[in-house]
Image (tube, grey):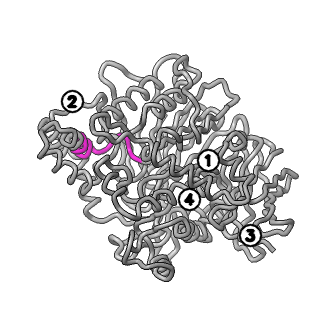
Amino acid sequence: MAELRLGPLLRYTDGSCATVWVETDRPCTAEVRCADGARGTAHSFRIADHHYALVPVGGLTPGTATEYEVLLDGTGVWPPPDSRFPPSVIATPGDDDGMRVAFGSCRWAAPPSGGKGRVGPDALDTLSARVAADPSGTRPDVLLLLGDQVYADEISDATREWIAGRRDVTAGPGDQVADYEEYTRLYYESWLDPEVRWLLSTVPSCMIFDDHDVIDDWNTSAAWLADMRATDWWQERVLSGLMSYWVYQQLGNLSPDELAADPLYTTVREASDGTDAVREFAARADADPASVRWSYRRDFGRTRLLMVDSRAARVLDEDRRTMLDPGEAAWLREQVMEGRGDGDRDGDRDGDSDSGSDSDGAYDHLLIGTSLPWLLPHLVHDVEAWNAAMCGGERGARWARAGERIRRGADLEHWSAFPSSFDALGDLIADAGTGPGAPASVSVLSGDVHHAYVAEPSWPGRTPDARVAQLTCSPVHNSVPLSIRLGFRFGWSAPARALGRRIARHGRCAPPSVSWRRTGGPWFGNQIMTLTLRGRSARLRLEQARADRDGTHVLRTVADRELT
């Protein structure tokens, strides 16, 4: 009898359909049955001796929530008979419903040995406990996980021991993850957590990778990439990282129509073993990042979400360095401006997830999800811009070599380390937020930097009609050492801003095309940020996971304010 190894994860939802992802222990037919009669089936597919199914569920009624169960070859496997959680549900948005979008990044399932300080309660666990305690109460309509869903380079003691039992850890990447099988272990460790498993079964999720999903500082620079490719273990590591991301995260980001049009997904489902096809796809994505699109669009009523790949889509050559390759940048502009008389469609690429929305293209709120913040503390921004100039040869070869060492050591690789891309994103946001039909808000949602804050930009000579904000929230569950707290607090200060300007002048850096100010934070802790979007209004809430005196973990509100 087939058994459930991982899942179910409720992934895509709209007013009439949904997808549910599962991993099973053998080939089987997976079925989802809903209490209201909606249902769907899918036969499992095989990747590297693991079996998966992504079940499309049709016939759902807009504006309703229905309980569901999962069956494998006709036998019920979810919910478990001894479950302490309420039934999992599929909730579909109605035409006039608002949206509650919760987001965060950077989650250790279990702290690695030698962790950098106190970790504290897991914000996802704590959110799950609150939703489970009041199933009919307020819950997120969608959960955005903005990178570092797993840590391939910072593993727990239990995973380290398991890896040491299957190979020689004195070779290759040592006690970091080496291959696909070891990646599956990371997902089991993360998503089999009982609270997280139930939460992901009942709240739809959208995901995008960041560096630790593959390795710290992934694609920092051309020199970094050349050094990694010179090792005897990197090729297997990166291909396994991309393969596992496609299976465990990317497939669920797509709608049933997008999946039906995806040639790789069709090939994998029709093959007795899809490993070679996915491996070839990953090899092509690594060799030619412009051939594959990991970014995608989701429309939730009158809210548009664009999840942007700010890792694999980079152009790393120092003389034309950009965060997004030209095709990716054109795709982003097209999706932002669709319905506003701008942007022509570029050619399709494998992995393209054009939404095919039935809407007229207008939206009240635009969400741009990018794992790396666009607007950083001013000192950090100026240092990254200076470093980009040094590495580009602005002060000669000696400074370029020093700049590369500093870039890697200090993780100088955010949007501000790609100055032309920083300015281009600012121009696009201003264009999107200005003129007739402009949305009420444009929010850039990010994580990565292990603190939370709100920053608001302004443009010389123009004032967008939309309220624009950088909303950063991390970590979900990770350490926040004192050095990070002190560094980022100082980074936002007036003395730091003056210091940053002096550093930028040494780099002969052009001033950025926007200015910005911090209007909230910095806040430190394990945390989740939620945007509540209703009509033309947007409200922000930041909650931190904390332990009460009796040891109970709760979410405490540390910020609650109107954005529009």
Q: Residue at x 52, y 16 (%)?
A: 436
In the image, taking residue 246 as reference, residue 32 lies left or right, namely right
Magenta extent:
372-385
Label 4 Cα neighbours within 10 Å, binned few <14 / some 14-19 / many ≥20? many
**Spatial CA span between label 2 and label 4:** 40 Å
Provide the secondary structure element on which disc 3 rests: loop
In this rendering, the label closer to the viewer, 2 or 4: 4
**Spatial CA span between label 1 and label 4:** 14 Å
Residue bearing the label numbered 1? 253
Mark sitting earlier along the chain (1/4) = 4
Mark sitting earlier along the chain (2/4) = 4
In the image, taking residue 306 as reference, residue 491 lies left or right, namely left
**Spatial CA span between label 3 and label 1:** 24 Å
Please tell me whether residue 188 belongs to the stretch shown in magenta: no
Pick the residue in front: 295 or 102. 295
Residue bearing the label numbered 3? 26
Query: Which quadrant does the N terminus fall into?
Result: bottom right
Residue bearing the label numbered 2? 510
From this viewpoint, is residue 133 visible?
no
Provide the secondary structure element on which disc 4 rests: helix
The amino acid on which the numbered mark 4 sits, given as a three-letter code, is Ser
Label 1 Cα neighbours within 10 Å, binned few <14 / some 14-19 / many ≥20? many
Label 3 Cα neighbours within 10 Å, binned few <14 / some 14-19 / many ≥20? some
Residue bearing the label numbered 4? 244
In this rendering, the label closer to the viewer, 1 or 4: 4
Mark sitting earlier along the chain (2/1) = 1
In this rendering, the label closer to the viewer, 3 or 1: 3
**Spatial CA span between label 3 and label 2:** 58 Å
Provide the secondary structure element on which disc 1 rests: helix
Mark sitting earlier along the chain (3/2) = 3
